[in-house]
Image (cartoon, grey):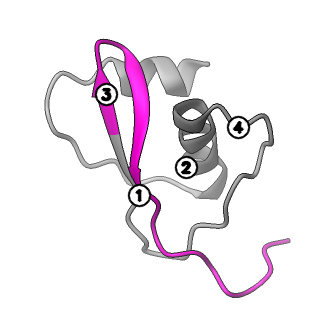
Amino acid sequence: RAMVDCVCGYQEDSVVFCHFIAINVIVGAATGADELISFRPDNGSVTKIRVDAGDLSLIELGAQASTRVN
């Protein structure tokens, strides 16, 4: 919840560098997914999220990894 609150608090366009689980938490909040892992972001991929009045929405998923993540 703290990650979602942090992202929802951004007031201007921002770039956030983070890891697999953090990206999945934000994507899950934006899409309403219940799964912890809703997609497998590739290393260095870019996922775009919109924040509007405290609500998250998915603009674009980054490239998905072709290898298995343990």
Q: Which residue is mark 2?
A: 23
Distance from Cα at disc 2 to Cα at disc 1? 8 Å
Please give left or right for residue 44 compared with residue 35 in the image.
left
Choose the circle earlier in sequence order: 2 or 4. Answer: 2
Please give left or right for residue 23 compared with residue 5 in the image.
right
Amino acid type of the residue tagged 2 in the rendering = Ile
Q: Give the quarter of the figure containing the C terminus.
A: bottom right
CB-based contact (under 8 Å), mark 2 and mark 1: yes
Q: Which mark is residue 47?
A: 1
Q: Which residues are magenta?
A: 50-70
Element class at badge 3: strand
CB-based contact (under 8 Å), mark 3 and mark 4: no
CB-based contact (under 8 Å), mark 2 and mark 3: no
Element class at badge 4: loop
Residue 11 occupies quadrant:
top left
Q: Which mark is residue 25?
A: none
Q: Which residue is mark 3?
A: 51
Distance from Cα at disc 3 to Cα at disc 1? 13 Å
Please give left or right for residue 33 compared with residue 41 in the image.
right
Q: Residue 12 in the image: x percent, y percent? A: 13, 30
Amino acid type of the residue tagged 4 in the rendering = Ala
Q: Residue at x 25, y 49 (%)?
A: 15
